Image (tube, helix red, strand yellow):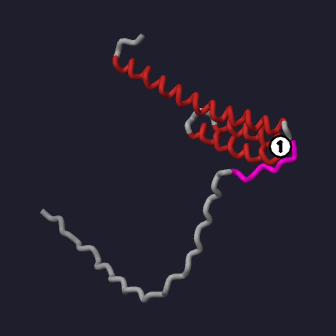
Amino acid sequence: MPIIKSAIKRMRQTAKRKLRNQQTKRSFRGEIKILNSHIQAKDTKKASESLKKVQAELDKAVKKNILKKNTAARKMSQLTAKVKAIGAKPTASTKAKPATPAKKTPAKTATKKPVAKKSPAKKTATTK
């Protein structure tokens, strides 16, 4: 057991973080089990819906740095392949598509103010 205050606090923080991380892991593992059960039953509609939930949970885990990005991508790829194998169409991903830039409408041609000409820089004499 630590004696130093900062070490005691660090232990409390670690315990809280561990619980939070375990809940997130449990969440996506549970969704994967549900998806696998739908795949075993060859229920195409439920499998494709469950795939969306799994993707959302994996994205949350990546966002919270519980899973690495490539690990989540690999798991998602494997699960998508399983869903396709039973003949289901994976639904569109939950990620939003990047917005297309709005077309610029030509502004009314306003008369521009004349630009004032710059006067030449003043020369200063440096004599002593």
Residue 16 picture location, percent across and down: 48, 27
Considering the whole magenta stretch, tell me its main secondary structure.
loop
Judged from the image, the secondary structure of the residue bearing numbered disc 1 is: loop
User: Going by the picture, which residue comes out furthest to the bottom?
Assistant: 111
Q: Which residues are magenta?
A: 83-93
**Rendered residue at 48%/23% (across/down):** 15
Screen quadrant of the N terminus: top left
Q: How many marks?
A: 1
Does residue 91 lie above or below 24 as drawn?
below
**Rendered residue at 36%/83% (across/down):** 115
**Rendered residue at 69%/37% (across/down):** 31
Q: Quadrant of residue 116?
A: bottom left
Does residue 83 lie above or below 105 as drawn?
above
Left or right of 85: which side holds 28?
left
In front: 127, or 114?
114
Screen quadrant of the C terminus: bottom left
**Rendered residue at 18%/68% (across/down):** 125
Residue 3 picture location, percent across and down: 36, 12
Residue 85 on the magenta segment = yes
Residue 126 picture location, percent across and down: 18, 65
Q: Quadrant of residue 111?
A: bottom left
Residue 62 picture location, percent across and down: 60, 38
Q: Quadrant of residue 23?
A: top right
Left or right of 85: which side holds 74?
left
Amino acid, disc 1: Asp
Residue 101 on the magenta segment = no
Circle 1 is placed at which residue position? Answer: 43
